[in-house]
Amino acid sequence: MKKESILLFLLATIQFSDILDFMIIMPLGSQFMRLFEITPRQFSLIVSIYALSAFAMGLLGAGFIDRFDRKKALLVVYAGFAVGTLLCSMASGYYLFLAARAITGAFGGLLGALVLSVVSDVIPFERRAHAMGMVMTAFSVASVVGVPAGVFLAAQFSWRAPFIVIGCFAACMLVAMAFFLPSMKDHIGEKSDRLPPWKVLGAIARDGNQMRALLFTIILMLGHFSIIPFIAPYMQLNVGFSDHQVTYIYLAGGTLSVFLLPFVGRMADRHGNFRIFSIASFFALFSILAITHLPAVPIALALVVTSSFFVVAGGRNVPATTMVTSVVKPESRGSFMSVRASANEMGLALASLIAGLIVTKNPDGSLEHYPYVGYFAIGMSVLAVWLASRLKLGK
């Protein structure tokens, strides 16, 4: 159990840096729009290019990822992620920054797939949701510690500073991974059993249950991420948050999630993943509606609304991820999770692009049409519950 705890801690830390690198873009959204002199649509492309690159690399990696020791794969992919993040800090303009985000996304998407594959390989199904909840608290820790620290660094020094720190942190983590991560080869079968890379995608496409899981992943992301890129800009430009106060969103919501996501995982192990996912999704509808219709209100009330979204909308991802990892056998899990990461990134890119097409900027600088993004997210969330009910789960 001690080795298991160390492994989960390392995986959560890897996930922390990966998520932080992606999340730091959102609270800096208004700064990027001002510094790069770009529109909301162009800002949404900064988010989308990362996801589109991760989508492409996930499909490419699906044919090979199960052929290697998970440890070696993690080291190589994480090194690429560190390099991409440092390149972001060196970009001299909008288009070079887009290129650097594409490089980071290519490795970041594979990294998430590998982390979830390791959890699924090592942790028995009966305890897997709780383990997923522990690893997924990386999102919450990134919100509580990473995002406020990143915003502070950007305010004190430059927007480049957060990316320099994340890149250096990843380089240090590579050393820890080399020493403390165990070799993981149990998923590797005989060479005669391996499908050629070009047949891996075909095997997934012929499996109706896996295809439903991928569609579920995309729809859930559309119902979750479409409102996220503009939460911070909306709170600043419409509700009245300052550049400093926007960090409170991540601090409050992340703190609650750190304590509640493992609890959600335990409830899912005890009462069933689908039941807990459905309950969390029901409450998420009200949070989405409240955030996207929020007028200028006191900061404390706005934080109650945003924190509710962190908890219930983020909480539903714990049983959702556990369900998706359970539709495939261990020997094919890495390949499937790589494709699943691509599906996740496709949904993320589409969600960001759709939101960017809907949201516009008024002459006074405030954002308009954000409520329509909320209606779209609610519809996708309801559809995700129906798709989840049709998944056949194994172990």
Image: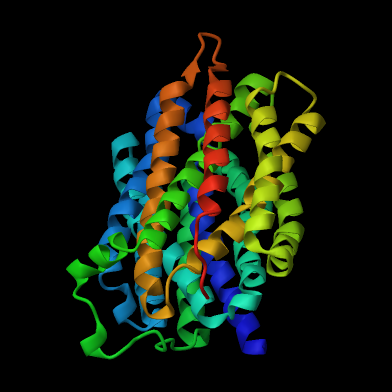
Which residue is the extreme one toward the top? 363
In this rendering, does residue 35 appear at all? Answer: no
Q: Residue at x 74, y 64 (%)?
A: 267
In this rendering, does residue 80 appear at all? Answer: yes
Q: Residue at x 35, y 60 (%)?
A: 339
Q: How is the image coloured?
A: rainbow
**Quadrant of the snapshot with the N terminus:** bottom right
For the residue pair 221 and 146, the one nearer the viewer reads as 221
Residue 361 in the image, given as x and y percentages of width and height: 49, 16
Residue 42 placement: quadrant: top left
Residue 101 in the image, given as x and y percentages of width and height: 36, 48
Horizontally, residue 199 falls left or right of residue 128, namely left
For the residue pair 185 and 386, the one nearer the viewer reads as 386
Q: Residue at x 54, y 72 (%)?
A: 11
Q: How many marks?
A: 0
For the residue pair 74 and 271, the one nearer the viewer reads as 271
